[in-house]
Amino acid sequence: IDPTEGHVLKGDLFAKQGKAEDAIKSYGDAIEADGKNATAYNNRAYHRALARVDIQQAKDDIAKALALRGDDPAFIDTRGYLSYLDGDFK
């Protein structure tokens, strides 16, 4: 398995176990290994949103994910959730 994808999968596993901090760290490890992994940026942003931590950093992450992959519906959903948490209801 590709090491970057291994970190993403590990993050997914932690997320399913309700271990948000560990999931966020694993997605960060994936980003360190490959700064162009759009899924890792999206997943880290989404789990920061769920945990309600580092919302501004999560918004930066989702912007990077969208810049890398374009208008992926899952990424747009994450951006919308972050906008909602930030009080932007438009």
Image: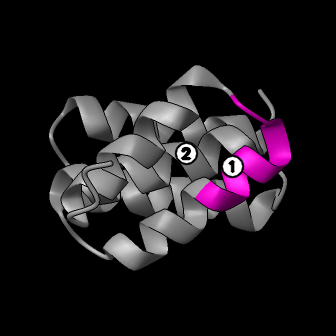
Residue 28: x %, y % from top left: 56, 64
Which stretch did the figure color magenta?
63-71
- In this view, 72 is above or below 87: above
Which secondary structure lies at badge 2?
helix
Residue 83 seen: yes
Magenta stretch: includes residue 31: no
Q: Is disc 1 in contact with disc 2, using a CB cutoff of under 8 Å?
A: yes
The dot on residue 42 is 2
Give me the residue at 57% from left, 70% from top.
60
Q: How is the image coloured?
A: one colour
Residue 75: x %, y % from top left: 56, 35
In whole angstroms, how far apart are the C-alphas of marks 1 and 2?
A: 6 Å
Q: Amino acid at mark 2?
A: Asn
Give me the residue at 33% from left, 48% from top.
90
Q: Quadrant of the N terminus?
A: top right
Quadrant location of residue 6?
top right
Residue 7 seen: no
Quadrant location of residue 4?
top right
Q: Which residue is mark 1?
A: 65
- In this view, 86 is above or below 18: below
Residue 20: x %, y % from top left: 24, 53
Q: Is residue 6 left or right of residue 67?
A: left
